[in-house]
Image (cartoon, rainbow, N blue to C red):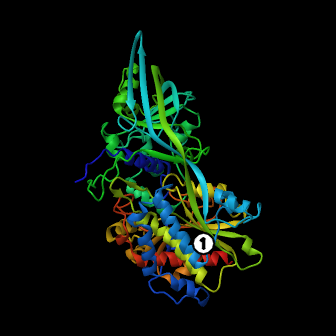
Amino acid sequence: MKKKFLPVMMLALVLLTYSWLQAQMPTLEKKPEEVKRALSLVSETQPVLEKYKVGFDSITPADTLNMLGYISSDWMEGRDTGSHGFGVAADYVVSMFKMWGVRPGGDEARMNMNIDMFRAMARGGGRPGQPAGRSYFQEFTLKEISDSKTLLTIEVTRGSSLKSRTFQGGIDFMSLFPAEERMEGPVVFAGYGIKEPSIGWDELKGLNLKDKVVVVISEAPGKDDPKSPFNQKKELKDKYFPEDQGRQMMLMRMRGRGQRFNKLDEIYKQQPAAVLIVQNRGKDSDIYNSLGADQNALPSDDKPIIDMPRKRLVIPGAKDMMSEMMGGASAPTVNITREMANLLLENTGKTIDGWKKAIETTYKPASKDIPGARVSINSTATSQLIKAKNIIAYIEGTDPKLKDEYFVVGAHFDHVGRWQDYIFNGSDDNGSGSVGVMAIARAMALNPVKPKRTIVFCLWTGEEKGLLGSRYYVQNPTFPMDRTVGYLNYDMISRAFDEQTMERYQKMLGVAGVEDLIKKIRPAYFATVNATKDSGFYEIQQEMNKYVGLDLYINEPELGAGGGGSDHSSFAAVKKPYVYYMTSMHPDYHQPSDSVDKASGDLLSRVIRLGYLTVFAFADK
Ligand SMILES: [Zn+2]
C-alpha cells in the first residue's frame, strides 16, 4: 500500500481551475434554434469523396490506437516538459514524420550548430552561412521555479500592543503567489467586493485600494435570502450564485463564449497590493475541502493524492499566467481562513461572520479601512533554466501562390510526468490529440491530392504548465503568423461519454422544442467542437460530418475569444480562427490511470477523420 500524502500540489492545480471557473461564469441559456443549429447528428454516413479517400482510409482505429499505445507507454515517463521521456517520445514522432515524408518545420539548423558541425565545417565539410535546412524541433528556454514558499504575516497594533502571526502557504492558506516577490500594505475590508450598478450596489465606493491589501468575501450577500437584492433577477442570480461547478464546466464547454465575469476585476483595476478572499460559507477546513478535486473519489493506488514537489515553468520575461487568465489586470490573490480574517478585523470589534451578518441584514455596504492592521507577504523560490522543445513539421501546399499561406494543426504533446513509482501516462490527455496531429500528417502525405495551402503540424510542449509551447510559437513562429490562416486544436479526443454524463449533458441542452433531437445523440460518438464564428469552420463541420458519422455539438465563439483550457487560446489571442475538438471529460484526468486501454479507437479515429477533412477543406478554399 502506498503512503497517502497531503494534496498540496493538486490543490494548487485545482485552485487554478477554480479561478478559471470564477472568471468564466455562464451567460444566458441557449434558445431552441441555437441548439438546433449547433447539433450535427449523423448515424448513417456517405462514401467520402474520391479526392480525400486515400488519406481518409489511412486513419483507422487500429493504427491510431497503436500510435497512442506507444506515446502513452511507461517508457515515455509521462512526457513532462523538458524531461527525458518527452525527448524519447518526440524522437518517435520525428522518425514517423521522416518515414512519411513530412518535412521538418522547426528551427533553421544553423541556429543549433554544435561543436561537431563547427569541426566538420573547419575541415571543409560545409560552408558557413548556408542554412543546412530545418530541424524538426523548435527549441527554447524556460525558467523552472521550485521550492517556492509563501509566508503571510498579519500584524495588528492596538495602542502600544502589537500582535503578529505568520501563516504558511499551502498549509494555512491557499496561494498561487508569484515566485520571489514581497509586498506589504495596510488592510481594507471591502465586504463582498461587488460593484453592481444595475441595483445601485457599490462596495468599493469611497475606498482607495491602491497598494493596499483588500479583504473580500466570496460570492455575494444573501444567497439563501429571498430579500437579497442579488436574488431579485435571474441574471443576477446566475452571475453571483452560479450552480454547481460541474454544471458550469459543462456549460462553458458547450458555449465556448469568451464572455467572462469576475467581480475582482473592479478591484484589480485600482492596483491593490494583494487580494485576500474569505469563503462566504463554511468552516476553515472547507477551504481545502471545497477546493479539493473530486470529493467522492477516495485515494487509491490508481488515483493517489500526491504531494509532488511544487514546480512551475514560465517563459522568462513573459507575463504571469495567472494575470493573463485574469485578463491582464490582476494582483496576487490568496484564499485565507476565517481565523486569519478574524485576526485582521480584530480592531473593528467584529468577526468576519459579524460583518457578513451586518451586510446581510441591512443590505448596505460596510466597507472600510481597518485601523492598525498590516499584512506582509513574502515569497521565495529557487529557479533554473531548462530547455524545452516543440515538434514542427509541414507539407507544402500545391498552389503556387497559396502555398505561402499556412494552416496549423496542433495538440499538446506534454503531460505531467512521473513521481516516484507513479507514471502519469496521459493517454487521453493528450496522447490522443498528438496522435490526431500525426495521423492527419500521415493521411495528407499518403493522399495523392494535397491542399492548396501549406499545412504545418505542431506538437506543443509546456501546455500543462500554462500553454507555454503554443504561446512561444505564436510570438516566435517558424512560418509567418500574418500568413497563417487558421488553427486546428485537439485536446483529449479518445474517451467516449457514458450514459450518465451524456444524460447530464442532454438535460442541459433540453430546452423546449428540441428534446427529441437531443435524445438522438449517441454517447459513443459524441464530440464537442468549438469553431470560430463566421470563419467557415461551422459549415465545414456540417458538410464533412456526413462522411464521418459523429454526433457533434458545435459552439461558435467570437473571433479572438479563447474559451480557456488549451492551446487554441494562444491562437485566439492573436486573432486567428480556430476549430477545437474535445470528447468526454473523465475521472482519470491527470491521474496515473489515464491509460490507453480506456480509449475508444472508433471515436478517436472518427474525430481525426473529421479533422483531416476539415483541414483539407479549409486549406483548399
Ligand atoms: Zn490537455
**Quadrant position of the C terminus in the picture:** bottom right
Count of residue discs? 1
Residue for point 49% across, 27% down: 188
User: Is label 1 in a helix, a strand or a loop?
Assistant: helix
Q: Position of residue 597 (x, y in %)?
A: 35, 71
In the displayed structure, 195 sits above or below 154; it is below
Quadrant in which residue 272 is drawn: top right
Residue 223, placed above or below residue 72: above
Residue 477 falls in which quadrant of the image?
bottom right
**Would you say 494 lies left or right of 327 here?**
left
Q: Position of residue 234 (x, y in %)?
A: 45, 51
Q: Is residue 194 visible?
A: no
Q: Depth check: 103 or 497 in front?
A: 103
- Looking at the figure, which quarter contains the N terminus? bottom left
On the image, the x and y values in percent for residue 602 come to: 42, 79
| Residue under numbered circle 1 | 537
Q: Residue furthest top?
A: 160
Q: Is residue 588 left or right of residue 236?
A: left
The amino acid on which the numbered mark 1 sits, given as a three-letter code, is Phe
Instruction: Name, please, the residue furthest toward the front.
Output: 123
Disc 1 crowd rating (10 Å Cα; few below 14, some 14-19, many 20+) is many
Give the residue displayed 42% in from the left and 69% down from the top: 512
Out of 436 and 619, give the one closest to the viewer: 436
Task: For residue 10, say whether it is visible.
Answer: yes
Q: Nearer the viewer, residue 349 or 459?
A: 459
Q: Position of residue 336 (x, y in %)?
A: 39, 35
Instruction: Tell me where residue 479 sits by quadrant.
Output: bottom right
